[in-house]
Amino acid sequence: TQLEAQGIELIQGYGPEQVSLNPDLYVVGNVMTRGNPLIEEILNRGLPYTSGPQWIGEHILREKWVLAVAGTHGKTTTSTLVAWLLHASQTDPSWLIGGVPENLPQASHLGEGKAIVLEGDEYDTAFFDKESKFLHYQPHRAILTSVEFDHADIFDDIEQVRAAFRKFVELIPEDGDLVVHRDDSEAMGIAAHAKAKVTTYRVLPDHDEDVRSADYAVKVLRAGSSRRMDFEIYERGENLGRFSTSMSGRYNLANIAAA
């Protein structure tokens, strides 16, 4: 329905007869496997194809300043927050979010501004490219929310997950930035491989007043009764002010701090 709302025609199924549509290029998603009738017809005829992440990297990102949000958890929420902050600042950013944002008009947008926000997925790219999608995204600034074992269908163990994220952070140039969750030991271990500047964030536990324990620290002031959370953000020990959110859970305060 999101696609239809944008005037994009949907065709159900993956029959080999669809080659009669004669597109300039087939963009193949990672759910499409060998043995799929349309994929086999494309291969048999030698028709041109690529993956979505590769196409984006080659045709969209070269003209943009890439801000990629990666991590096992929190990618969609944090990507949406970052896109909203840039959108609200009237910089007309682009974004590509792997979910349904409730405060943006749609999940993807190509703006006139220089910045593009991408949800950086560690899942593989296509049947012909088993590397993670985010390796196509050429980030200048990145957020790393968390790292743990996930996607057991493509990763055998936590070390393979670590390897994918290490490759990701090593793509960030020396003059770029990596923003990482201070309290996630795996994420911090990955950040040690970055050549870029590393900035940390965390949500302070109850009764912890060490606002200098991360570059950006969140202190919870109130939670629960009003259906809102009030909090303060400290930038390298300096109080930036009091804020409030309708989002619930300390993990979302961490996502807000990252954004």
Image (cartoon, rainbow, N blue to C red):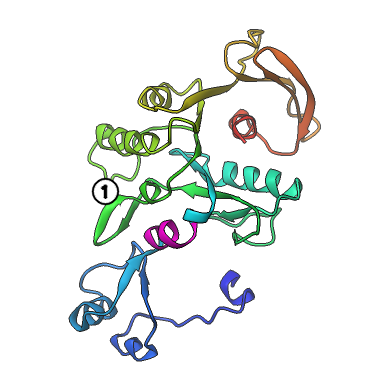
Q: Nearer the viewer, residue 7 or 116?
A: 116
Left or right side of 145 for 212: right
In the image, residue 169 lies at what x, y percent?
39, 34
x 21%, y 84%: residue: 45
Residue displayed at 46% across by 24% down: 184
Q: Main secondary structure of the magenta part?
A: helix
209, above or below 252, in the image: above
Task: Report the residue at 26% width, 57% height from top.
Answer: 129
Q: Quadrant of the N terminus?
A: bottom right
On screen, 59 above or below 231?
A: below
Write down the quadrant of residue 221 in the picture: top right
Q: Residue 38's image quarter?
A: bottom left
Instruction: State yes or no: residue 221 in magenta.
Output: no
Residue 183 lies, in percent from the top left, at 50, 20
Q: Which residues are magenta?
A: 53-60
User: Relative to residue 168, is residue 222 drawn left or right?
Assistant: right
| Closest to the observer, 177 or 211 | 177
Name the side, left or right, on which 211 lies relative to 225: left
Res 253 → quadrant:
top right
Q: Kindly state the secondary structure of the residue where label 1 is placed.
A: loop
Quarter in which the C terminus is drawn: top right
**Which residue extends farthest left?**
44
Q: Looking at the picture, which amino acid does disc 1 mark?
A: Ile
Q: Which residue is mark 1?
A: 154
Across and down, in percent, residue 106 comes to 64, 62
Check disc 1: other Cα within 10 Å, few if <14, some if 14-19, many if 20+. Answer: few
